[in-house]
Each structure stands twice: as C-alpha cells, then as structure tokens.
Image (cartoon, helix red, strand yellow):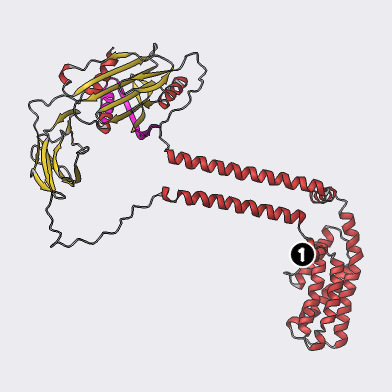
Amino acid sequence: MKKSIFYIVVFISSWCFAQEDVQILSEIDTTQIRIGEQFEYTITVDKTSDVVFPKLEALGGLEVVSESKIDTLVSSLVKKYQLTGFDSGSFYIPKQQVFLESKAYFTDSLLVNVATVAVDTLKQKPFPIKPIIDEPVIFDDYRPYFIWLYVLLSVLVLVTAIYFILKKYYGDDSANKKEQIPPYQEAVEKFASLEEKQLWQNNKTKEYYIELTEILRVYIGREVKIQTLEATSDELIRLISNKNKEKEIGIDPSEIKTLAAFLKHADFVKFAKLRPLADEIENDRATAANIVEALQPVLKKYKQANLLIDDEYSRYVKAEAALTPSEKRKRTLSYLGMFVLVIAALSFGTFQVLKLMKMGAASISQIEIPELGTNEVWEKQSFGTPALTLHAPVSIPLRTNEVPQHIQTVLSSLGVYEYNHPQGLSKINITTLSYAGINAQIEQVMENTIKGMQQQPNVEDFEYERQPANLKNGMQGVYLSGNLKESGVEKEFKVIGFTHENLVWQVITICNEDEDEIKTMLGTLIDSINIEIE
C-alpha cells in the first residue's frame, strides 16, 4: 500500500494549487489586434530557481511566432512570447501550467480580439504571388531512388554473372583458338608468317629481329611456364637454366649456350644498330628454327611425364576433362541457383531494414504474445477510459480511483493500478488520469515521475535514457528505460507515457537486474500496450 501511495504522490505531486507566497502573473500588451499583427504575452514568476515555463500549445485561433529566453530579474523570472492570429474573432489564451519545484501552478486566461483589415481593392493593387517555398530535403525523399538503384544493381550483377557463366561453359571458343594452339605449332606458323612479310629484304632488319626473338621467347615461355617477354636476354638465360635444373626438364646445356649466343647477336641488331649481311640473317633464322626443333622433343617428353604428377592442378585438369556436357550444365545451374538465392536474400534483408528504419527503432507496436515457458495465462486487461490495454500473465488490480480533495480542481479523474511480486522481484504500476480543463504535457509528466523515483529513500546510481514511443495507431509518447540501485539491489526500470488532449496514461515496470525471465515477460507486456481512442 505504501508503494501505491508513492506512485500517486509521484504522479500528482506537481498538480497542487499555488501557495499564498507564490505569485504568477500573466499579461498581454494589447487586447485588440488586426489579422496578422503580433502581440506580446508575458509570464512573470516571483521565484528565480527550479521554474519550468510552458510551451504554448492548443491556442485555438492564435499562433506562436517566437519566444524569448528567460529574463532573470532581482527576485523573479520573466518569459515572453510573440503571438499572432490569422482568423478574426475573440480568442482566449487558456490557462498555462507553470512548474515550480515540481509543483504545477496555473496562469489566468486572457481574451484577445482579432479584427479584420478593411482593404480597398480599387486603390490597393494586389501583391504578386509569392513562390512556393520548398521543404528541406530529408533521407526519406530519396528512399525510393535507393530502393530502385539497389534493384537495378542486383539485376545487373545477376545478368553479368549469367553472361560470364554461359560464356565460360557454352560460349564460342573461336576467340580462344589462338591460345589453344600448341606452342610448337604456333611458333612454326609465326616463322612462316614472318618470312612472308619480307621485313629485312625491305631494310627493316631491326623489326625482323624483334619479331624473330619474340617468336622464340613466346615458345619457350609457354612450354617452360616462365615470364620471357619482360626479361632481358641474360635474365632469360638464367631463368631457363634454373628451371632446367629445378624441374629436371632435360634441356642440353649446349642448346642453352646456342640460345644465349643467338639472343646476344639479336640484341646487337636491335639496340646497337648492327647491320648483318643477308647470309647472317638467314643463318639466324635457321638457328631460331633449330632451337625450337631441338627443344620440342625434350619439352614434349617433360610435359608428358609432368602430367602424371598427382598435384592439385593436374587433378583439376583431369576432373574437368572427365566431366560430361550434361554434368557441366548441372554444375552451372547449381551455381546460378545459389547466386539467385544470395541476391534474393540480400534483397529481402534490405527491404526489411528499410521497413524497420521507417517504423523507427523505438516504436512500440502490438505483437503476438510468445510462449515464455511458464504456466501463466496471458490475458488482455484494460485500464481507464479511454482504455489502455495490454497483455499480462498476472492480474493488475485497481488500488485507488479517488482524486485527493486538494487537487480535485486540477484532476477530474484518477486511476492507479498496481501489482507487486510476492518476493519483491518486480512491480507493475499503471496510472490513468484526466486534467480538468487543460491539456496534458507529456514531457512534464515524465520529468515529475523521474524526479519522484530519484527522491525515494535508499535509491542511488540512478541513470536512464529517453526514446520516442509510437503505438500502432499512431499515438506518440515517451519511453524511458534505465537502471537504479535500491537498498544495494540493482534493478531495471521502464516508464512509458502517453497523452491525448487532457488525458494521461503511464506504465512503470521495475524488476531485479538478474531476473532475466521476469525482464522478458515485462518487455513482452510493454510491447503489447495499446490505447483505444475512437
């Protein structure tokens, strides 16, 4: 019962009438304005600390233009607001709620008359039409473009992957015929083609030797698997010699010496501007062809022996050669299917993330109540009018619905519901109320609740964070979650509050930090909150 009284005091401690020693003055600098004119509304409080001025809302036909910073005088605080009206008629500035030391005080209501402005349309020319003011661009404005961009990129990636897969396994191999020609056959064909060009006969000796040495280099590079085109002549000879020893290829050292002499003589022609005679050119051409003919049987024998080695590459080559066209098609289709599944999963995940971003990370919506491995029966319960509903595994009874006498002019209704765990492991408090003649301010309500909880005896290490709360029906509120230590016991608490006009609903849950199952149940309870407003 003491805890019930605590929550009542927390919730309504700031809704008392002003004491005699507190003076709050509200005034306006004029009671008559024309449409569009501005006037000043001033609130003066004869205190200089712990004062919270109102944020003007629900002014009817009046609007707030601006508000100034709080002016501090010798023994009072002054807050000024600039107001205006765009509809003719008489409008009241309703009573405003000013909080002083966590207690609520109310200003007087003031009447303002807004008169129309007589305009002679015959003498006064109309003003030109003003251009439309663009709203600031936000991320949501570009969200559809990002979604379509993602879809387009996914389609392009999918089409590209299909193209390369089909090209690899089913494409025309005519473009790769050159690479598939054996090195020896390619060298022979290039020798014949070089002779047909008749380069040295047309005084292009240097170009002739460049192509001649390139034919030899390409042949050796493809057969021995070394980089020959980028190497100098001396580097090439060292590479061949080392490869011959390491891999035991079997090339005769005399052939390597012949190759070295040929390359050296060719370098003189290419770089030292040596001009050989016709007989020397023919002899170099024959030497290049003889080197190829001498190396061919040796390298052929080496490759045949090397294919018998059971290394990873050889196994891959053999496995590829053993696959039938049907098996290759099945493999291609399986790869394609896996790729499509990956794209579909990424697309689904992206749309879900965008959906969650749109809903808001802190949104509170109705969910299906999960089974928590307990024997309790979850039931839908209602509190107040209009009703706040939620699902809970325990009954949350009404503790009091009587409005204390000293605040009956402030509150028209009050309901406090509370459940306490038998072992004190958790508690649930639900409060519903309605103001008398004024609109509720959720920020002030939540601030008073937090202050009341902090001021409780034996409470320390109090910390919390604030987030917006949105119900599925669009109602907005405030969600506070945090931790505290009470009598040395660490606890987790959550406070959720909503307001609508003069109505207030608030739910508070507290449980021990180490009670994971209870915390899960309370989280489910909070997620099921809804307010049924017609």
Taking the image as drawn, is residue 116 in sight?
yes
Considering depth in this image, is 419 or 235 the residue closer to the camera?
419
Query: Is 454 one of the magenta-colored residues?
Result: yes
Question: Is disc 1 surrounded by few (<14), some (14 to 19) or many (20+) residues within 10 Å?
Answer: few
Residue at disc 1, secondary structure: helix
| Side of 376 relative to 137 (left or right) | right
| Side of 359 relative to 350 (left or right) | left
| Side of 344 relative to 79 (left or right) | right
The residue shown at (12%, 58%) is: 120
26 shown above or below 179: above
Quadrant for the N terminus in the image: top left
Taking the image as drawn, is residue 79 in sight?
no
Residue 481 occupies quadrant? top left
The residue shown at (86%, 53%) is: 307
Task: Measuring from the top left, give residue 466's x and y in whole percent.
Answer: 34, 34
Query: Is 503 one of the magenta-colored residues?
Result: no
Magenta extent: 447-475
| Side of 5 relative to 368 (left or right) | left
Task: Measuring from the top left, give residue 189's x and y in whole percent.
Answer: 85, 73
Residue 282 occupies quadrant? bottom right
394 shown above or below 259: above
496 shown above or below 127: above
Task: Measuring from the top left, give residue 519's x and y in whole percent.
Answer: 43, 22
For badge 1, the amino acid type reads Ala
Considering depth in this image, is 264 or 214 the residue closer to the camera?
214
Residue on which the image places disc 1: 175
The residue shown at (48%, 23%) is: 369
